[in-house]
Each structure stands twice: as structure tokens, then as C-alpha cells.
Image (cartoon, grey):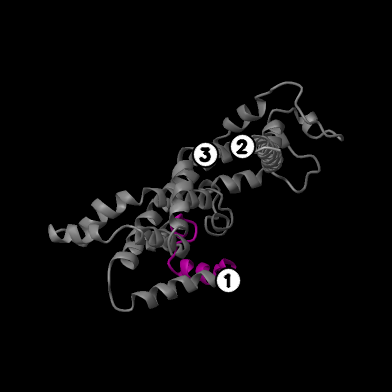
Amino acid sequence: MNMEALAGVWSGHRSIAWSGRRAGHIVLRLFLYIALTIGGLTTAFPMIWMILTSFKTFEEANAPQIVWFPSALRWDAYLAILSRPEFLRAFANSIFVTALAVGGTLASITVVAYAFSRVEWPGRDLVFLLMLSTMMIPPQALIVPQYVFFNKLRWIGTYNPITIPGFFAGGAALVFLLRQFMRQIPRELDEAARIDGASHWQIFWHIILPLCRPALATAAVFLFVAHWNSLLQPLIYLQTTSLYTLPIYVTSLVNPQQVVQPWPTIMAASFLTALPLIVVFLLLQRHLIGGIILTGMKG
């Protein structure tokens, strides 16, 4: 067998091996897409079921057998829940509490993170370690002492216990996230700004803060979800129907004394409660993913 024949045989073997690897790669990707699709549908199933149930009739939602799809799209549950002044008031209360708590927390944790990452001062690392150690305290262990403290301040029955703590850098995890992000910003920017006569406040406001938009968006999403979905704290501290937020109102729609529940109305209220979370996530999704990735790139 001459060299040309050997080269042809070798080329044929290489072509077969390459085709086999390509086929295996296609099959692997196909299985991966199928697994991700099944996982996505499984995760989204509660939301899909909630939306479908909100369009059902009372009889379809409480039928002995499972009714997967409504016979027709009925907006009765949405019209009923939107016509209730209690729901609209609870929606407005949730917007007010969440906006105030998220804004105050973001303003405070960015300043604290800047102090821990860009300013040299005695005992900084020790104080940072003490702050991180607070993450080991279970939130349930703080319920009673916090209630006693806020009661002495006469804050029970107001929004103060929910909103004001955020103005004092509430959340060691978010401070840590922002600190790690700020540490990635080159210090040469600070030095150049100091040469030009900039103060710490000017460096923070004009240089560091604009570069921290991905991390701030990530923190904003976490805070928004936490405060918008919060049920325990408003239930403990508000104690007045006119001050109730959406989670409390939606929970109150379920009557444990009744066997048959108004599920279309409950699901419509639940979907309207979850809708702002979906909108915020879609708007900040790019910044959220980018902030998490960039924060984890450097210790």
C-alpha cells in the first residue's frame, strides 16, 4: 500500500472519528436542553397553575377532579379583587414600605461598604469580622428582643420597625457583596482623584458609585423581593388593618373555617402580588446576573 492510500485511510478514520464526536456532542446538547426544559417547566408549574386557576370559575377551582384548564378565560376574579378598597390599600402600603426600606438600605450599605473597602482606618478588619459574625445569629432569635426594643420606642403599630432599621446598614450579606465588588475597582482611580483634590465623598459619589451599578442592582432585587414578600414582620408590628401589606391581605383571604375556598380570587390576588416581582426581575435581570458574576470573580 502506497503512501497516498495510507493517507486516504487515515483521513477516512479521522473523518469518522470527527463525525462520531460531533454526533455525541449533538446528543449531549439535546439531552441538556431536554433536562433544562423539564426543570424550567417544573419550576414554573406553581406560577402556571396559579394563573390558570385565577381564570377558572368557582366550581372548576373546587371540583372533585382536577380541572387543568378553564373552559373560558374569565376575568371575574381580577375584577372582584381590584374592586376591593382593602386590596388597593394593601398594594399602596406595600409600595410605600418597600420603596422606603429598599432606598434607605441601599443608601446606608453603600456608604458602609465604601468605608470597609476603600478607606484605611484602625480596626477596620476586626469591625468587618464582627459585622460578618452577625450573619450566624438566626433571625428567629431576634424577634422577642426586637419587639421589646421597638415597643419601648412606641413604634408598634407603625411602619418604623420595618423601614427605619434599613437606614442603619441592615444586612451584613449585602454589605459584604458591595464591599467585594468595590475592592475590584482599581485604586489608581482614587489616587488620581485625590491628586485633583477630591474628597472621600466626591470619590464615592462620582467614581465608585457609578461603577457599582451591577452590584447595586443585585442588592436592590434581593431587598425588593425580601421586603415585598415579607409576612412575619408586618404581621408582628403593624397590628392595624389599614396598615397591612399585600402578603398579610392575601393570607387573610384563606379562611381556615371553610372547607371550600374562593381559589380564583385568592390566585388572582397572589398573581397581582407576584407581578411587580416579575417586572422588577425582568428589568434588572442583566444587571443582576452581571453583578453576581463580577462579585464572585475576586476575593
Residue placed most toward the observer, 291 or 240: 291
Residue 52 percent coordinates (x, y): 70, 31
Please identify the dominant SS of the magenta region.
helix
| Segment colored magenta | 138-161
| Label 1: few (<14), some (14–19) or many (≥20) C-alpha neighbours in 10 Å | few
Residue at numbered disc 2: 271
Query: Can the viewer see residue 50?
Result: no
* The C terminus sits in image quarter: bottom left
Judging by the rendered image, the residue that carries numbered circle 3 is 276
Q: Amino acid at mark 2?
A: Phe
Q: Earlier in the sequence, mark 2 or mark 3?
A: 2
Compare marks 1 and 2 and give the one earlier in the sequence: 1
Label disc, if present, on residue 141 of the rendered structure: 1
The x and y percentages for residue 12 are 68, 35
Provide residue 196's location: percent of width, then percent of height.
12, 57
Amino acid at circle 1: Ala
Q: CA distance from mark 1 to mark 3?
A: 31 Å
Check if residue 135 falls in the magenta segment: no
The residue at the point 32 percent across, 60 percent down is 111
Residue 1 appears in the figure: yes
Task: Tell whether 154 sits left or right of 85.
Answer: left
> Quarter of the image containing the N terminus?
top right
Q: Amino acid at mark 3?
A: Pro
Q: CA distance from mark 1 to mark 2?
A: 32 Å
Q: Quadrant of residue 40?
A: top right
Distance Cα–Cα, label 2 vs label 3: 9 Å
